[in-house]
Amino acid sequence: MGREETATATSQTEAYTALSRLLPSAIKPRDGLVMEDGRNLGVPKRILAQAFVEARKLFFQNAKDEDGRALALRATRVILLFDPEHLTAANFRKRSLLALQSDDTPAAQWAYRKALQYEFCFLDSILTSPLHRQSKSPTLWHHRLWLSQLALPSNVEAVPEDAPAEFWRRELVSVCKSGERHPKNYYAWQYARSLVNRVDGMEATIDFAHVVKDWCCQHPSDTSGWSCLLFLIPKIEPLAKRTALVRQVLGYGLELRLEHEALWVLIRTIVADEALQQEAADICVALREYVTEIEDFGGSNVLIGRVRNTLTWIEKYGHSSECRRIHSD
């Protein structure tokens, strides 16, 4: 190996060692777990690329060696930080967790529970980062969904009563943060939809919907967030609470005279749907009155167009005959 090649290899090793030392440890052998949390990392692209080259080399050198599996597992953190779609690395982490799960000794089960906790921490460090490609990684969000099924099994009788609620609240915080890091983060909000099906009880579902609604009102142009809220609204019972949430969104948009198309798409879709039943007619009346108001007081043409298009769409596709009749009068 020439002098230049030796210098490059040394630089790659140093980059990998420095970055690997700072990333959350997540899964480690059963004799212990180490995590460093509460710090931000700034990594030059050149250093990250060098660390990836070294990590990839170490991974493939050790992945099939029983004695080297811990070293290979450590390398997957840097691999996924650089290349979040690296399926081989993600699947290796899955197999490592399943190996811990299969051992039913008390020590191994304790290690398994801690490994789950640190795996979520590791995913948070990437999925809520400002790195757009990483925070919107379909591979890592799918990995998180798989992980959530391990952490909170379908049969929740064996877990504490408040564990499911605490779990989804924590996960929803991560989704919201990731949505801020990468606007219109479809994969993050799709993960949120998967959580809804595991929320236990109507009060928890309503709470879930209000968290999403508050986030959407703070990010009114984010179509993915509104799409998730649209998915949630029909699940709310009774009808009065469902309608109240829709009226809150509508009131927010009317008061601030928001022109964002994503918000008005949600309004027109949910009002035209059967979800609001007879309450849809009252909302149509409010929209017609609002059009008259903003026209009389010089509202923007964009906003007037948004509301008129919303009413036209409801008239054409709405299930409420009363709403269609009011619009045609």
Image (cartoon, grey):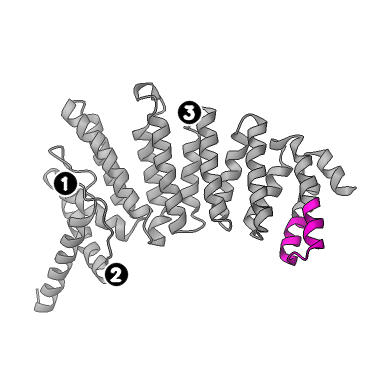
Task: Mark 1 or mark 2: name the one nearer the start of the chain.
Answer: 2
**Residue placed under numbered mark 1 in the picture:** 70
Question: Residue at (37%, 30%) from the top-left corner?
Answer: 163
Question: Residue at (27%, 45%) from the top-left corner?
Answer: 93
Real-space Cα distance between discs 3 and 2? 43 Å
**Which mark is in front, 1 or 2?**
2
Mark 3 closeness class: few <14, some 14–19, many ≥20 residues within 10 Å = some
Would you say residue 302 sits in the magenta stretch? yes
Up-down relation of residue 208 to residue 42 (above or below) = above
Question: Residue at (49%, 58%) from the top-left corner?
Answer: 183
**Residue placed under numbered mark 2 in the picture:** 45
Residue 188, numbered label: none
Badge 2 element: helix
**Which mark is in front, 1 or 3?**
3
- Residue 116 placed where, x, y %? 28, 38
Is residue 110 rendered to the left or right of residue 240?
left
Which kind of residue does numbered mark 1 sit on? Answer: Ala
List the single residue furthest toward the front.
297
Assess whether mark 3 and mark 1 are in contact (beta carbons under 8 angstroms): no
Magenta segment: 289-309
